[in-house]
Image (cartoon, rainbow, N blue to C red):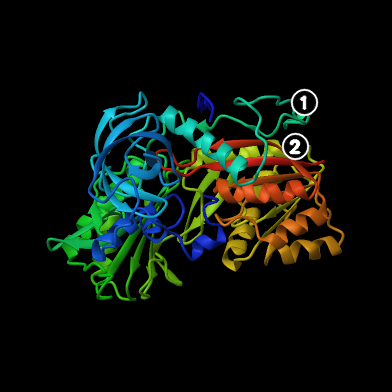
Amino acid sequence: MKRQRSNGAMGRRESAGRAYESAERETGMRSSNKRSRNGSAGDLRGARKQEAPEIAGLPVSKNDEVVIDIIGMNHDGEGVGRADGYTLFVAGALPGEKVLVKVLKTKKQYGYAKLLKVVVPSPDRVAAPCPIYDKCGGCQLQHWSYAGQLAWKRQHVVDALERIGKLRVAAGDAAGAVSDGAGAPGVALGDEGIVVLPTLGMDEPWRYRNKAQVPIGVTDGGLVGGFYARGSHRIVDMETCLIQHEHNDDVVTRVKAIGRELGITAYNEETGRGLLRHVVVKKAFRTGEMMLVLVTNGQVIPHVEAWIGLIREQLPQVVSICQNMNTKQTNVIFGDETRVLWGRDVIYDYIGDVQFAISARSFYQVNPVQTEVLYSKTVEYAGLTGRETVIDAYCGIGTISLFLAQHAERVYGVEIVKEAIEDARSNAELNGMKHVTFEVGASEDVIPRWKEQGIEADVIVVDPPRKGCDPRLLETILEMKPERVVYVSCNPSTLARDLRILEDGGYRTLEVQPVDMFPHTTHIENVALLVKK
């Protein structure tokens, strides 16, 4: 597969098992809600409810209109500008632009402003193709050329390594990288620092998502479904999403129409009443199979037989129809109980040559094309010859473990969520891989026990959630002293923090490869290779 690389100097998503409890948090498709807790758009909403007193001595005040130069971009995808040295965050502004903005809110160190006019545009500014881009919170970067996105994502990684990890990064895109003859990079010539390679992008960065998770609501008396507007829980109705597979759009549209026809009510967050909360659709890119999950506020679905019959009649590609019951007043999509209404309880798909069974609640990477790129790089960095023992911490349902098992003598995977390990064992059996062992528990507890049993790892692979590795796991890695550590990360900040700890403990980071798993969003995956000094 030809892959696009960025030019110029420049999440994990939750662990696999944690997706069972919080399936909505993986690519920023609900990023508006996270932002409302962490700042930005949510702060603006709060500001309208309770006006904060003006801070004296600032160069700008609320409602001022000023022209500023945009000098960078923050992790939320907002342009960063300065007005007489005072930092303003501006949604929709790009680095290198001169813009007219209106100040919306000021804090002591920084403020927020609304983009009124682009005075001098960036050469990388493009027209966002999505008709609801300015309303939906799913994507943040559609107004930026794809090459510009890739270059910024690499620079975002470089900045985190240097500022948070206090690590030295080699100049240029790939300075000093050499091969050790085992298919993985070796020691950089002259020890110039960590090589951060250009971001691996997609040839076609649209329609890449294999899973849609659509909240359902009511507008003007009609059933609607789409995504939450930025900084709110107001549902923007949507007929098409340009980063979703077209078949997912089709299933969601038809399910909404069937729901209206049958008089199905939508769940109301404020009252806790109504039936249908979410429609979840999963698409297997390789096999073409699809699964539909109706997340309901209760056990009983009115006219359920008619519902199933119409879905089967109108959507023959759907081979599994499930119901998940969630009666809690929570933002988490899935409840604890799932049942099959019709068809199979799983669909099947492949990553490379490895087959996976995907259930209603099991985690599976949402961009299968780039997942294969990410895992191939992981195998390359592991430098496997077929004789190694590999430990996969945070193994989830075994996706990386089984990918590694094609090239290793023995693989051990550990994950704290019991359901994920059950899926991992089933997937190992599905592929006839008897040299893979999975165990439930915390990595920092299980791996030392394995060591006491005489299991020594040549390579340890970690793929933690956004918060990074548990400190005790990092201590365990330093005690195990594997020849190589391969760190897969969805969060450059926690990656930089953990690399600093491993470097202080006797390892050296040779190379970091950013991989664009989620085009047009601010998220970036990375694979880092560390070797013993």
Q: Depth check: give the residue in front, 498 or 211.
A: 498
Q: Residue at x 27, y 71 (%)?
A: 275
User: Could you tell me if residue 128 is visible in this image?
Assistant: no
Q: Residue at x 62, y 54 (%)?
A: 398
Which residue position holds label 1?
A: 190
Q: Is residue 193 left or right of residue 367?
A: right
Badge 2: residue crowd in 10 Å (few <14, some 14–19, many ≥20): many
Q: Depth check: give the residue in front, 236 or 86.
A: 86
Q: Depth check: give the residue in front, 181 or 433.
A: 181
User: Could you tell me if residue 501 is visible in this image?
Assistant: yes
Which residue position holds label 2?
A: 383
Amino acid type at circle 2 is: Gly
> Where in the figure is residue 392, as x and y percent of width and height?
69, 53
* Vertical order, 2 against 477 (above or below): above
Q: Is residue 216 left or right of residue 523?
A: left
> Where in the figure is residue 483, as x and y percent of width and height?
81, 44
- What secondary structure is marked by label 1? helix
Q: Is residue 400 left or right of residue 155?
A: right
Labels in figure, total = 2
Cα–Cα span, label 2 and label 1: 22 Å
* Vertical order, 392 against 87 (above or below): below
Amino acid type at circle 1 is: Gly
- What secondary structure is marked by label 2? loop
> Where in the figure is residue 351, as x and y percent of width and height?
56, 42
Residue placed farthest to the left in the image?
220
Q: Depth check: give the residue in front, 66 or 452.
A: 66
